[in-house]
Structure formats: C-alpha cells, structure tokens
Image (cartoon, rainbow, N blue to C red):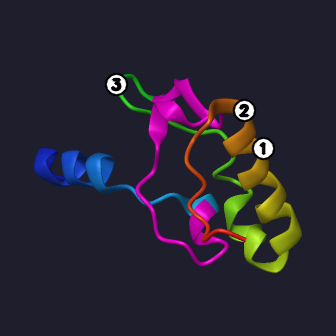
C-alpha cells in the first residue's frame, strides 16, 4: 500500500459504530473513548471495538447503547438524528 493511500485512509476513515446504525461519519479517532492510541500504527492508534463492529448490524440495540456510551463519556457529538 502506498504512503499516500495510508494517509488517505487515516484521514477519511469512517466510524464503523455509527455506520452500524446507518449513519456515515468520519471516525472521531482520539476524541472517541473507544480509540486506543497504544495499539495499531504508532502514530494512529486504532478502534478498540473494531472486532465487534461487524456483528453490530444484527445487534442494533447494542450499537445504540455503545453510541450512547461514547456520547456520554467524552461528549463526542451524537451522529444520529435528534430523537
């Protein structure tokens, strides 16, 4: 993978958690309580729940709960439309 492609993917990474409830948003990275700066590439970190994201499509209640946790812990803007 070229260096340009790596940078593009890091900058434009989409949030899999928000995507699991049908919302497209850029990954908040270090502003997200699920971001683990200690894992992954030394400069980028990684999502600590990325292993469960593929299963959230069949567990919408869990996805909604995790978004609520994310919003509450760090004040990350809720990507979902107002309820």
Residue at position x 74%, y 77% from top?
57
When the figure is inspected, residue 64 is found, relative to residue 30, above or below; the finding is below
Q: Secondary structure at mark 1?
A: helix
Q: Tell whether 71 sits left or right of 26.
A: right
- 12 in the magenta segment: no
Give the camera-side residue of 6 and 10: 10
Position above or below: 79 against 29? below
How many other residues sit within 10 Å of disc 2, few (<14), some (14-19) or many (≥20)? Answer: few
Nearer the N terminus, badge 1 or badge 3? Answer: 3
Q: Which residue shows up at 46% across the image and 39% down it?
A: 29
Which residue sits furthest front?
A: 82
* Secondary structure found at label 2: helix
The C terminus, quarter of image = bottom right
Q: Residue at 65% of width from left, 68% of height from top?
A: 82
**Are the two marked residues, 3 and 2, in contact with CB atoms closer than 8 angstroms?**
no
Q: Which residue is mark 2?
A: 73
From the viewer's perspective, tell me whether residue 34 is left or right of residue 40.
right
Say if mark 2 contacts mark 1, CB within 8 Å: yes
Q: How far apart, in angstroms, are the residues tagged by discs 3 and 2?
A: 23 Å
């Amino acid at each position: 993978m070229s260096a340009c492609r790596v940078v593009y993917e890091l900058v434009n990474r989409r949030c899999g958690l928000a995507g699991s409830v049908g919302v497209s948003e850029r990954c908040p990275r270090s502003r997200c309580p699920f971001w683990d700066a200690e894992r992954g590439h030394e400069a980028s970190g990684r999502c600590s729940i990325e292993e469960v994201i593929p299963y959230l499509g069949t567990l919408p209640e869990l996805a909604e709960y995790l978004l609520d946790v994310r919003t509450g812990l760090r004040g990350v803007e809720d990507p979902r439309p107002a309820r």
